[in-house]
Image: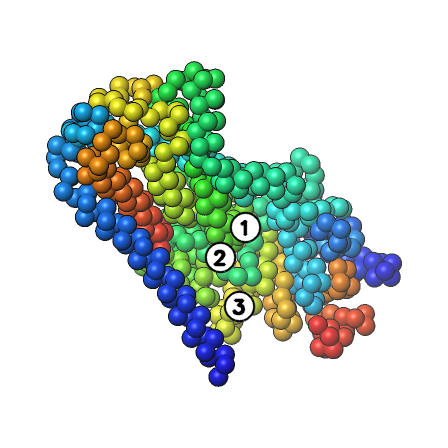
């Protein structure tokens, strides 16, 4: 295991990382899900996490906004620095962290509220009551998520009436409405048809100018298309990380090569 | 072919059993309505009893039952919902939580006369509320609490996990999440619990027998420390304790009919409320 660790450390050289993960291990009760992960995530780039089911990539993602906290028996050791602050420090503010690190889930989860109220949910729980500001935020967020033109005439309609692809973009807009710096995406397009998937990928391409994006995906073409860096996880360990182009064309570790060439997974 | 016969047999059996149960209930209701409807008059509904209940009306018993049921639900609903929130949202899964659940289930199975005796000991004597609406309502509240907790828990569990995660991921605290993105969607289900609770509270005799119910009290209560008459207890008196049981039979049927209608009215009210909430959630909210 030491080989891998050194190798991934060596490949780490990332200028001004927004997220810096050091020796992260995660346990669910007795079971260890992640082993000593060391990974830097560059600012305003797209980092893709790939690997077979159960390899720990989603667990890793959910550490970055401490969503694992709500899973009973989950236990985390190591350090995650975001903008230099240790998010697992006992005094860390989870609410502030989750404002800064937004999340889009695998299955789109619009709340059974109007489109407007879905987007305004975040700003409202953080105390924004001014209707004018809320309206502006809703419009700006929907614009950014590329959904504004499709829904501007029916903001008061239920979000559940939108199509699957629209719902996922609504969830992205909802996450953007609280002005995050980092956006975590857990297989955001895995439940969508090819057209909606293309839509989401275009959107990621636009968003990377303003946000640090970490995306978990099962789809290797997708990782190759949208990300500039890719990290390959296997059985709870980070096997290899590097520039996406290099990792896909010239992987330095056998396991990575086997996975991306489809020999297992 | 053999399996088909079995299929037909069990299908018919299930059908027969369902129809029989429905028929029995229909007959009970039919019998009460047929024999009770003749007694129902404005005087019966709004008058005070006289001659030990052989004549006059049953207004004090109607008022008593409504007060007791409402009192019970006012106490039990907040307590039950709060317990359910604790058990589903905050409490860690483990031995302690399991013990609480076991206690609740056991509580649901305790005979109502035991609740009556407990209420007598705790509220009437120890807290010295005397035989009163307060003591009776609290006793009924304890009795319906398990039902409300269990149905409220189910309602909370039925709210998808993704609503909670979505809200938490936006930086909401757990309480904000529960208040704005869980409770509103659990409310209709919780109302079902209170429907069942009120129905039971209105119909029980044993818990109020020792804590509030007056044998014969032809006036309305002034405060929560007053005794009241109640429909189920009045019915019990007329049917078993009255010197001329045959003579007051029509009064018994009339009382039973009124009790039935009140319970149905409570239920109907809650059902309407629930479907209105559901519609609100589905369409606009």
A69 on left or right of B178: right
Q: Residue furthest bottom?
A: B1
User: Around disc 2, counting alpha carbons within 10 Å, would you say few (fewer than 14), some (14 to 19), or many (20 or more)?
Assistant: many
Q: For mark 3, name the chain.
A: A
The residue sitting at 78% across, 55% down in the picture is: A35
The residue sitting at 41% across, 28% down in the picture is: B138
Q: Nearer the viewer, residue B189 or B276?
A: B189
Report which residue position mark 3 lands on: A191
Helix, strand, or loop for circle 2? loop
Mark 1 and mark 3, same subunit? no
Task: Please say whether residue A249 is visible from this viewpoint.
Answer: no
Report which residue position mark 1 lands on: B165
A178 on left or right of B277: right
Mark 2 and mark 1, same subunit? no
Mark 2 and mark 3, same subunit? yes
The residue sitting at 34% across, 60% down in the picture is: B20
Measured as percent of width and height from the top left, residue B169 is found at 55, 49
Report which residue position mark 2 lands on: A109
The residue sitting at 31% across, 48% down in the picture is: B271
Helix, strand, or loop for circle 1? helix
Measured as percent of width and height from the top left, residue B80 is found at 46, 37
Helix, strand, or loop for circle 3? loop
Measured as percent of width and height from the top left, residue A228 is found at 66, 65
Compared to residue B75, the image places residue B224 above or below, namely above
């Amino acid at each position: 295991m030491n080989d891998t660790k050194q190798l991934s450390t060596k490949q780490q050289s990332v200028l001004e990382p927004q997220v810096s993960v050091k020796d992260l291990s995660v346990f669910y009760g007795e079971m260890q899900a992640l082993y000593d992960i060391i990974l830097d995530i560059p600012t305003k780039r797209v980092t893709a996490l790939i690997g077979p089911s159960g390899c720990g990539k989603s667990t890793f993602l959910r550490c970055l906004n401490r969503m694992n906290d709500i899973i009973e028996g989950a236990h985390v050791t190591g350090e995650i620095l975001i903008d230099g602050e240790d998010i697992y420090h006992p005094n860390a503010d989870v609410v502030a962290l989750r404002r800064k690190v937004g999340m889009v889930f695998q299955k789109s989860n619009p709340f059974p509220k109007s489109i407007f109220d879905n987007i305004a949910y975040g700003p409202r729980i953080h105390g924004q009551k001014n209707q004018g500001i809320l309206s502006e935020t809703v419009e700006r967020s929907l614009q950014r998520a590329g959904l504004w033109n499709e829904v501007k005439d029916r903001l008061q309609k239920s979000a559940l009436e939108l199509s699957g692809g629209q719902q996922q973009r609504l969830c992205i807009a909802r996450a953007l409405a609280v002005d995050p710096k980092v956006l975590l995406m857990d297989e955001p397009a895995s439940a969508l048809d090819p057209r909606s998937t293309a839509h989401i990928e275009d959107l990621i391409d636009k968003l990377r100018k303003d946000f640090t994006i970490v995306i978990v995906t099962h789809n290797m073409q997708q990782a190759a298309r949208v990300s500039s860096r890719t990290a390959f996880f296997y059985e709870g360990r980070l096997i290899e990380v590097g520039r996406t182009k290099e990792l896909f064309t010239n992987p330095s570790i056998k396991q990575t090569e086997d996975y991306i060439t489809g020999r297992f997974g | 072919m053999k399996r088909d016969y079995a299929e037909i047999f069990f299908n018919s059996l299930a059908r027969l059993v369902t129809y029989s149960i429905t028929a029995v209930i229909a007959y009970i209701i039919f019998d009460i309505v047929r024999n009770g409807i003749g007694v129902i008059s404005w005087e019966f509904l709004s008058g005070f009893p006289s001659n030990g209940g052989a004549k006059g009306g049953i207004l004090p018993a109607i008022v008593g039952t409504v007060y007791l049921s409402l009192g019970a639900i006012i106490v039990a609903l907040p307590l039950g919902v709060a317990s359910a929130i604790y058990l589903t949202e905050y409490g860690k899964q483990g031995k302690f939580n399991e013990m609480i659940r076991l206690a609740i289930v056991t509580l649901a199975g305790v005979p109502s006369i035991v609740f009556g005796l407990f209420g007598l000991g705790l509220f009437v004597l120890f807290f010295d509320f005397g035989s009163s609406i307060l003591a009776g309502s609290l006793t009924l509240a304890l009795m319906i609490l398990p039902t409300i907790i269990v149905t409220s828990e189910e309602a909370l569990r039925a709210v998808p996990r993704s609503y909670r995660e979505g809200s938490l991921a936006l930086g909401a605290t757990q309480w904000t999440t529960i208040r704005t993105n869980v409770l509103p969607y659990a409310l209709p289900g919780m109302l079902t619990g209170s429907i069942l609770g009120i129905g039971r509270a209105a119909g029980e005799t044993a818990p109020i027998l020792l804590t509030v119910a007056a044998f014969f009290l032809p006036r309305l209560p002034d405060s929560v420390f007053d005794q009241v008459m109640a429909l189920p207890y009045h019915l019990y008196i007329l049917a078993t304790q009255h010197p001329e049981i045959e003579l007051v039979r029509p009064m018994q049927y009339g009382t039973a009919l009124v009790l039935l209608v009140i319970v149905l009215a409570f239920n109907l009210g809650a059902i309407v409320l629930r479907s209105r909430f559901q519609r609100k959630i589905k369409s606009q909210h």
